[in-house]
Image (cartoon, rainbow, N blue to C red):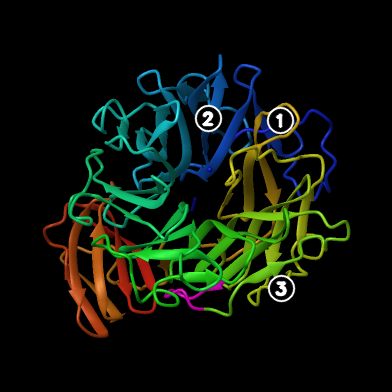
Amino acid sequence: MRTATCIALLCAPLVALPQFLDPGFGENGVVHLDVDGSFEQFFEVVAQADGGIVAVGHANVDSDLKGLIARYTSQGELDTEFMGTGYHVFDVGGADTELTGVALFPDGRIVCSGSVGSGSLRRPAAFLFSPNGQPAPDFGSAGASVFPGTTSGFGEDVAVTVDGKVVVVGGLGGNIFAARYWDTGLLDETFNGDGWMDLDLGGSERAYSVGAQGDAMVVACYGDPAGGPVGTVWAKRITEDGEWDATFGDEGSVMHGVTQGGKAFDVFTRGDGAILLSGLATTMGMYSEAVNFMLDADGHGDGAIVTETAPDEEGRPTKAYAGWLMNDGRAIVAATEGEDVLLIGLSASGALDPGFGDQGLMRAPGLALEDGSNEDAAGLWVEPNGRALYCGRSQDGGDAFIAAFMTGATGLAEGAVDHLKLHPNPATDQLVLPWSEAGAWRVHDALGRAVLQGVQPGSGPLILSVAELPPGTYRFVQHGASRSAGASFVVQR
């Protein structure tokens, strides 16, 4: 999710429909952070299990770029239990440092993607923090694992696999880049032989976001294939072994057939494998339209959905930065139209959802998003109660922000869908899943570690022996051909 982040500023009073912004969050539904009076940017935001809100990005401090991570309470107050101030500004070895993506381990640890470097040489990096913001001492070097080598690159987004590994995507030497790490910060050499991979389509390519899909990873990206079909590559899939999946989409790619450019900034993968891609297409000169793809687990669908977000009566360009796919097929998309920040509600068909906001739109007209040189400039997270957290950097003042929209949406999902029935629950010696789809399965403990795993050869009952597991709470996840599903269970004696 992925693929960025945090704190917002309003120099003028926010003029927005009051029923859209949460009046109990910050000031009139918005929080803002100013570290030193220069500029700050949040790229991604997530909500923790206890309701805490974590956002990551960067801050310009005395002309040096610093990594920025902050945590707020669910009411929009800086949480002083987080590094004593509610936020943490840091660098790696005195070099420019930024955080661009964030994800959570089941035990609450915070993992981030980003880059570290000086001048024209930047390198992708992964970062790990405790739930309270302390850099993890046993991850890389003091919580940071910087990709080796002298080729310039950057990390754009991060995801955690079902077995607790860390995947970072971005760009390296102008190519799409992906690396997989153990939770110690070491590259996982079972992934493509040395822990990383890239893809050269013949031009300048970049991955902006990554989403877990069982043991595979779906990557939202940009790339114009040399000598290939007219249009841009919007998504690829990486297998568990670190290979580009030729069965995904159309011969391995999801393409958007635009002639003047198009970019996918975000991918959301639902628990059953369904995919939402969000981005933009340039149609005339610098004019752009928000574009979304709603696809099945293998990257197939009805094609690009161009969303007239206003409708565009004034011809203002629109961009879709991030999306969230609900269980019933509807979607919420974080976007901009001109200087307005807005959420787009889409029906399962891709049309504007008339039951969402004002004819499918929720606006914050007084909150203008500044993207500058950062194309993937805003992040979205939708809480279980339907409240949507939209983050970025404001144009006026250059502060980072989070705006909380009350969407009223239900049926939200992130990760495996909880619709499996396990019994007995609690269990003592064995656990039965009455109907199980053929596919791989795993059992994870409360720290996200895989403690049991196997393959179900055919549909029918699955009997698991849990006699050797210590008492506690566990998570069963199965990845079949048509869906991913899961359920929690308790072992007690």
Position of residue 168 measured from the top left corner of the image (x, y, whole percent):
37, 47
Residue stretch in magenta: 294-300
| Amino acid marked by disc 2 | His
Q: Residue at x 61, y 66 (%)?
A: 292
For numbered disc 2, what is the local secondary structure?
A: strand
The residue that label 2 is drawn on is 58
| Amino acid marked by disc 1 | Leu
- As measured in the structure, the alpha-carbon distance from the residue carrying label 1 to the one carrying label 3 is 32 Å
Q: Give above or below for 350 relative to 334.
A: below
The residue that label 3 is drawn on is 351
Is residue 5 visible to us here?
A: no
The residue that label 1 is drawn on is 9
Q: Residue at x 30, y 81 (%)?
A: 437
Count of labels in the image? 3
Quarter of the C terminus within the rendering: bottom left
- Closer to the camera, 416 or 202? 202
Describe residue 92's horizontal placement relative to residue 46 as left or right. left
